[in-house]
Image (cartoon, rainbow, N blue to C red):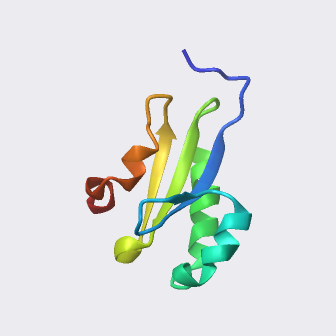
C-alpha cells in the first residue's frame, strides 16, 4: 500500500568509477571536476520531470555515472531497491 502522506522525492547520485556513491553536495564538490561533462540544465530538467512523475511515498533517482558518462533516471524506486544495484555494470547498459 502506498503512503500518500509522504511526498515524492527525487535525488541525484553520482556513481564513481570505484563504485562509490556520492549523494551530498559537500562530497560532490570534492569530485566536481570529474563530472564537468554533465549538462546541469539537463539534470535540472530531468529532476523537474521526475518530480511530476514520482508517486507520493516513492523516490526517484537520477544516477550520473562516471564510467561511460551516462545519466540514467530511476523512477518510483521502492523499498526493495538496493543501492548496490546502482553500481552494477548491467545498470549502466540498460
Image quadrant in which the C terminus is located? bottom left
In-image side of 39 versus 70 (left or right):
right
For the residue pair 68 and 17, the one nearer the viewer reads as: 17
Residue 57 image point, x, y percent: 63, 29
Identity of the residue furthest to the top in this view: 1
Q: Residue at x 51, y 84 (%)?
A: 37
Image quadrant in which the N terminus is located? top right
For the residue pair 82 and 75, the one nearer the viewer reads as: 82
Q: Is residue 78 above or below residue 45?
A: above
Residue 11 image point, x, y percent: 62, 52
Q: Is residue 90 above or below residue 83?
A: below
Q: Residue at x 41, y 65 (%)?
A: 18
Q: Residue at x 38, y 46 (%)?
A: 85
Residue 17, located in which quarter of the rendered image? bottom left
Q: Residue at x 69, y 74 (%)?
A: 29
In-image side of 71 versus 61 (left or right):
left
Q: Is residue 76 above or below residue 44?
A: above
For the residue pair 7 and 53, the one nearer the viewer reads as: 7
Amino acid at each position: 500500500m502506498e503512503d500518500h502522506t509522504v511526498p515524492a522525492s527525487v535525488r541525484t547520485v553520482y556513481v564513481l568509477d570505484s563504485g562509490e556513491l556520492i549523494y551530498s553536495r559537500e562530497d560532490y564538490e570534492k569530485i566536481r571536476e570529474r563530472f564537468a561533462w554533465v549538462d546541469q540544465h539537463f539534470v535540472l530538467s530531468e529532476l523537474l520531470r521526475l518530480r511530476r512523475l514520482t508517486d507520493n511515498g516513492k523516490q526517484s533517482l537520477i544516477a550520473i555515472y562516471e564510467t561511460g558518462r551516462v545519466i540514467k533516471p530511476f523512477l518510483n524506486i521502492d523499498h526493495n531497491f538496493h543501492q548496490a544495484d546502482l553500481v552494477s555494470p548491467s545498470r549502466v547498459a540498460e
